[in-house]
Image (tube, rainbow, N blue to C red):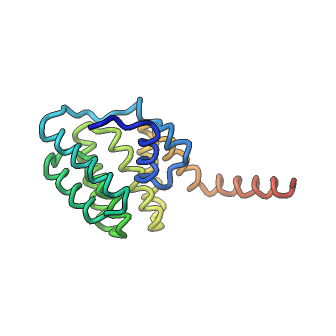
Amino acid sequence: MSQLSSHDKAVLNCLFNPNLPLDQAYNEELSDNIKDQEVNTPDIFKSKELETEGIKLAEVSKFDDALNMLNEAVRASPKRASPYNNRAQVHQLMKNTGDAFNDLTMAIDLASKYSQKRTLCQAFCQRGLLYRKEEQIELAKEDFEKAASLGSLFAKNQLVELNPYAALCNQMLRQAFESLK
């Protein structure tokens, strides 16, 4: 398996985190700060390979095949949170919101239990976005706060956007700049 370039990583980051600002896609703030604690056993290695293949299939919109591959990744190592997190993204792309929520909750549970902090942070962000989309703002804030406490700049930005005072300030700034034109 070849090493991904920083551009490839940014493309994948944009695919699996569509609301992530572009500058953060290239400068993933968690890459050096938070890592999943995993020992590369044969089962985990197999799960990672299957997960990577599932992501590649999702990139070319082969969602059913991607889902099957991610299901295999889960079966290969059921205690790994990452395949659940990525499978949730495929569920979202397929408009299966309920299944996405279930997978994200499982990813959060497993990541919490097995020190998979990077995946934990990503799952909180992804579930926070789903809650926001479903207009469950308080639940979204809770997840973004947890992700922010793990170091996610994206989650911190989401919390600012969800703050009605910050939104009002942003609106006033936009109006002020428009009047200066």
Side of 106 relative to 22 (left or right): left
44 or 65, which lies in front? 65
Residue 142 in view, yes or no:
no
Quadrant for the N terminus, please: top left
Task: Find the residue positioned furthest to the top.
Answer: 32
Count of all numbered marks drawn on residues in the image? 0
Q: Is residue 5 visible?
A: yes
Q: Is residue 120 above or below residue 169?
A: above
Percent x, y for residue 141? 47, 54
Q: Nearer the viewer, residue 74 or 65?
A: 65
Q: Residue at x 56, y 56 (%)?
A: 162
From the viewer's side, name the closer residue of 89 and 132.
89
Q: Residue at x 31, y 63 (%)?
A: 62
Provide residue 75's location: percent of width, then percent of height: 14, 52
Q: Position of residue 38 (x, y in %)?
A: 22, 34
Q: Quadrant of residue 97?
A: bottom left
Relative to residue 44, is residue 58 depicted above or below?
Answer: below
Q: Quadrant of the C terminus?
A: bottom right
At 47% from the left edge and 40% from the top edge, which residue is drawn?
A: 7
